Image (cartoon, grey):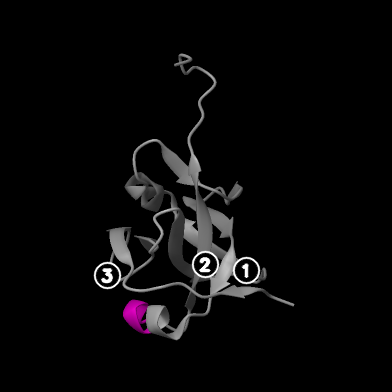
């Protein structure tokens, strides 16, 4: 059974990586501790595919709070909870070949970082 999640709107769009002016897109959710990621459907439940370039729009010193799988052809597979909030979905106007997932905003921790 796939889990789904509700979220308050409006979502703040922080970036898109597309060739046609549409999607995939990256948003910050209402509480600013979650990203909403709109991407292409895959054959894996709760998993989308997004171009590498979309991650360039992450807020500074953050990361997606989800493991990424590099497909080897310029995209990542990302898993999260499926967005089910009707108002948020209306805002996104997602095409039939895509879905949106919600993932935590992670804190980037680099091995070469100098301790504070």
Residue found at the very far right of the displayed protein: 1
> Looking at the image, is mark 3 or mark 1 earlier in the sequence?
3
The magenta-colored residue range is 90-94
Residue with the mark numbered 1: 46
Mark 1 neighbour class, 10 Å CA radius: few under 14, some 14 to 19, many 20 or more: many
Badge 1 element? loop
> Which residue matches tag 3?
20
Query: Front-most of 12 and 21?
Result: 12
Q: Quadrant of the N terminus?
A: bottom right
Residue 86 percent coordinates (x, y): 44, 85
Please give left or right for residue 87 compared with residue 105 in the image.
Answer: left
Residue 94 appears in the picture as rendered: no
- Sequence-first tag of 3 and 2: 3
Residue 12, image quadrant? bottom left
Q: Are marks 2 and 1 in contact (CB under 8 Å)?
A: yes
91 in the magenta segment: yes
Pick the front one: 15 or 43: 15
**Does residue 53 appear anywhere in the picture?**
yes
- Image height check: is 95 above or below 104? below
Say which residue appears at 47% left-offset and 18% top-offset.
113
Quick check: 85 left or right of 43? left
Which of the 4 image quadrants contains residue 37?
A: bottom left
* Main secondary structure of the magenta stretch: helix
Label 2 sits on a secondary structure element that is: strand
Q: Which of 105 and 41 lies nearest the eye of the viewer?
A: 105
Question: Residue 101 shows which numbered tag?
Answer: 2
Tell me the CA gap for discs 2 and 1: 7 Å
Residues at marks 3 and 2, CA–CA distance in whole angstroms: 21 Å
């Amino acid at each position: 059974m796939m889990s789904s999640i509700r979220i308050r709107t409006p979502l703040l769009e922080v970036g898109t990586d597309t060739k046609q002016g549409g999607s995939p897109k990256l948003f910050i959710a209402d509480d600013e501790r979650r990203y909403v990621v709109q991407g292409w459907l895959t054959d894996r439940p709760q998993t989308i595919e997004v171009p590498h370039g979309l991650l360039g729009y992450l807020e500074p010193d953050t990361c997606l709070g989800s493991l990424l799988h590099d497909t080897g052809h310029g995209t990542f597979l990302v898993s999260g909870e499926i967005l089910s909030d009707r108002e948020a979905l209306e805002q996104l106007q997602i095409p039939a070949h895509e879905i949106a997932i919600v993932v935590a905003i992670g804190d980037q921790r680099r091995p070469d970082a100098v301790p504070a």
